[in-house]
Image: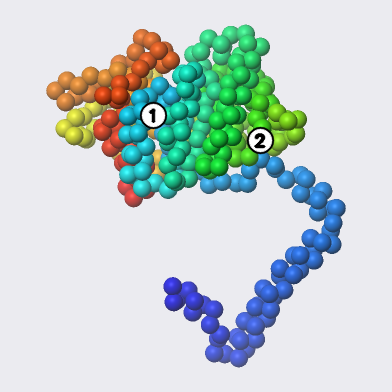
């Protein structure tokens, strides 16, 4: 600290002293010049400010997060386990994403457990899922459902806006829509929002190729115009290539090859997926060096059934959809094994 202060000591050389004095005088006058410009330009300045985005100033984007698709169906114990793992990781910023409407009774309850962590939180909400029949049927019916859900999201957003850094809205998880349809969905969702403050949009596109426009200008619930900026594309793949700004291994399996608590898994623990495989060590290291936001997905996050045979863990996709799956308070899917993986991933000192 003393070395930092010494940078401001007067130089011994008189010539250098004059230069330093001139610099200090300039710094003193600079605020006065700025004030003079503001008062002098009057309405012209107001016209310039009117063109600035009105939703949110830029916010630091977390480099890591968890794709907790089925979070709304988790038990309270499992969600609390996840919350503690995030805290124990010592991360300073974090993103979690989920589909609240798998639980129509209490869609946002578990999210509120996570967004209460006293760090910089980005909460990402998927308003739909591609395998819902309404998301791939009559387009008018799809927009009507999105409008209804957006109204519920609006209430939730108004409640959490003060305690999160960002709120990201994704019309549907892994959409097959055209670019025009996606923009229509965004406009319908925005029309149910009271404010655009801290809100950003993201596209989760099944083909991982359709880059959304960086800035989207549309109308809010009260009829005012809002410019939503920093719109991003999320791709679901095992590697970090391509142009998408957000990568999730959702659809691929990142497995813990080294034993944890005497239990272990390998690529054969989950079969029948098309997204590829990677060890936690390799995927975590790739996420660390990538400039993209990395969203970790695990079978437990979707409440996929698992069995342990001689300490070997294997997973199976349930025959029922996520809205019909249930967690167990006494034996939650997010257990100590999952908690340790999260701590490894989010810990800034290790990965």
Nearer mark to the viewer, of 2 and 1: 2
Q: Residue at x 71, y 68 (%)?
A: 31
Quarter containing the N terminus: bottom left
Q: Which residue is nearer to you in this view: 334 or 309? A: 334
Mark drawn on residue 297: 1
Identify which residue is drawn at 50% across, 39% down: 122
Q: In which quadrant of the rendered image does the C terminus lie?
A: top left
Q: Residue furthest left?
A: 310
Q: Residue at x 58, y 24 (%)?
A: 152
Q: Quadrant of residue 72?
A: top left
Decide if residue 290 is in sight here: no
Q: Are marks 2 and 1 in contact (CB under 8 Å)?
A: no
Q: Is residue 72 left or right of residue 25?
A: left
Instruction: Relative to 179, say whether 284 is above or below.
Output: below
Q: Quickly name the residue at label 2.
A: 195
From the viewer's perspective, tell me whether residue 153 is left or right of residue 49.
left
Provide the secondary structure element on which disc 1 rests.
loop
The residue positioned 63% from the left and 46% from the top of the image is 57
Q: Residue 297: x and y, percent?
A: 39, 29
**Which percent across, then down, holds residue 308?**
20, 21
- 113 or 61: which is nearer to us? 113
Image-based side of 305 in relation to 33, left or right: left
In the displayed structure, does residue 99 sit left or right of residue 20?
Answer: left
Image location (x, y in percent) of residue 198: 60, 40
């Amino acid at each position: 600290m003393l070395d930092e202060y010494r940078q401001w000591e007067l130089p011994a050389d008189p010539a250098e002293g004059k230069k330093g004095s001139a610099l200090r005088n300039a710094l003193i006058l600079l605020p006065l010049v700025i004030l003079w410009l503001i008062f002098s330009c009057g309405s012209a300045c107001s016209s310039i400010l009117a063109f600035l985005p009105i939703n949110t100033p830029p916010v630091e984007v977390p480099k890591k997060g968890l794709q907790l698709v089925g979070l709304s169906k988790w038990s309270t114990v499992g969600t609390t386990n996840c919350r503690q793992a995030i805290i124990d990781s010592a991360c300073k910023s974090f993103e979690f994403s989920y589909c609240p409407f798998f639980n129509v009774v209490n869609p946002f309850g578990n999210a509120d457990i996570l967004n209460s962590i006293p760090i910089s939180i980005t909460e990402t909400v998927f308003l739909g899922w591609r395998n819902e029949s309404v998301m791939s049927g009559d387009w008018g019916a799809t927009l009507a459902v999105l409008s209804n859900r957006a109204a519920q999201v609006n209430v939730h957003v108004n409640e959490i806006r003060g305690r999160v850094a960002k709120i990201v809205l994704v019309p549907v998880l892994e959409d097959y829509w055209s670019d025009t349809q996606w923009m229509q969905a965004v406009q319908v969702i925005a029309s149910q929002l009271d404010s655009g403050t801290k809100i950003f949009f993201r596209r989760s596109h099944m083909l991982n190729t359709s880059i959304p426009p960086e800035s989207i200008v549309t109308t809010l619930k009260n009829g005012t115009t809002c410019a939503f900026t920093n719109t991003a594309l999320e791709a679901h793949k095992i590697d970090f290539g391509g142009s998408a700004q957000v990568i999730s291994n959702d659809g691929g399996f990142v497995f813990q090859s080294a034993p944890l608590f005497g239990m272990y898994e390998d690529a054969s623990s989950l079969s029948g997926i098309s997204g590829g495989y990677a060890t936690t060590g390799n995927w975590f290291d790739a996420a660390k060096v990538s400039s993209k936001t990395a969203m970790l997905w695990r079978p437990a996050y979707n409440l996929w059934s698992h069995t342990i045979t001689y300490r070997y863990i294997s997973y199976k996709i349930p025959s029922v959809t996520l809205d019909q799956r249930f967690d167990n308070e006494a034996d939650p899917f997010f257990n100590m094994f999952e908690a340790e993986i999260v701590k490894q991933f989010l810990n800034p000192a290790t990965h």
